[in-house]
Image: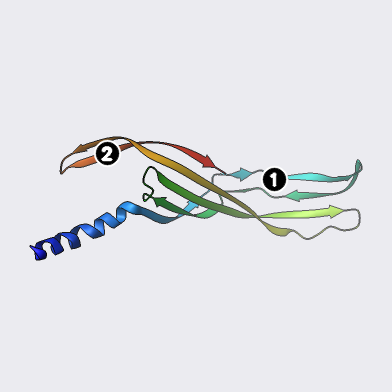
Amino acid sequence: MKKLLTIIMIAVLPTSIFAIGGFGLSVNSSTFSVDAGSSDLMVENIKVGSFSYDSFENGGGIGGYLYLDIIPVVDLDIEYNFTGQVYNFTFENAVTTSETQEFAFLAGSMFITIQKPVFDLGIPFLAKAKLYGGLGMNT
């Protein structure tokens, strides 16, 4: 009997560990784009210079994901994403014009979601489905 119990625990325990949470990394691509343009630099309504910038689009990024199912009442989902792209800009004033410089555009976002199972549906030995309800915040 002890051997049977030991075999069952060894077979079941690793799969039950996955039920407490999960994590992951992602590589992404942004669809954000900026057209080329220029802007005057004003001091007390007097133009003292200007800067111009090239267009850029489709920055690359990386993200992370953490899912916790160990809280008794709800599940917690936390995601971070960061994207960036390099673009060129030039500064000018009456005294000097700078060389074109590279500058980085960076953006980040965070998502937090609290979820609770609302409805379970299962066909024994074939499939299982859950419907969740929840609240989330995005920054």
Residue occupying the point 17% across, 42% down: 126
Q: Tell me where residue 80 appears, x and y as whole percent.
A: 51, 51
Sequence-wise, the earlier of marks 1 and 2 is: 1
Q: Quadrant location of the C terminus?
A: top right
Residue occupying the point 80% across, 54% down: 91
Q: Secondary structure at mark 2?
A: strand
Label 2 neighbourhood size at 10 Å, few (<14), some (14-19), many (20+)? Answer: few
> Outermost residue toward the left?
1
* Camera-nearest residue between 71 and 40: 71
> Outermost residue toward the bottom?
3
Q: Amino acid at mark 1?
A: Ala
When asked about the image quadrant of residue 23, the answer is bottom left
Q: Is residue 67 left or right of residue 10?
A: right
* Camera-nearest residue between 15 and 98: 15
Give the mark count: 2
Residue occupying the point 30% across, 38% down: 130
In 3D space, how far apart are the residues under numbered discs 1 and 2 (Cα atoms)? 49 Å
Q: Tell me where residue 29 appears, x and y as whole percent.
A: 51, 50
Q: Tell me where residue 28 appears, x and y as whole percent.
A: 48, 52
Q: Tell me where residue 71 appears, x and y as whole percent.
A: 39, 48
Residue 119 lies, with reference to residue 85, above or below; the image says above
When asked about the image quadrant of residue 32, the answer is top right
Q: Which mark is residue 129?
A: 2
Q: Amino acid at mark 2?
A: Ala
Q: Quadrant location of the N terminus?
A: bottom left
Residue at the spot of label 1: 36
Q: Is residue 35 left or right of residue 111?
A: right
* Camera-nearest residue between 58 and 138: 138
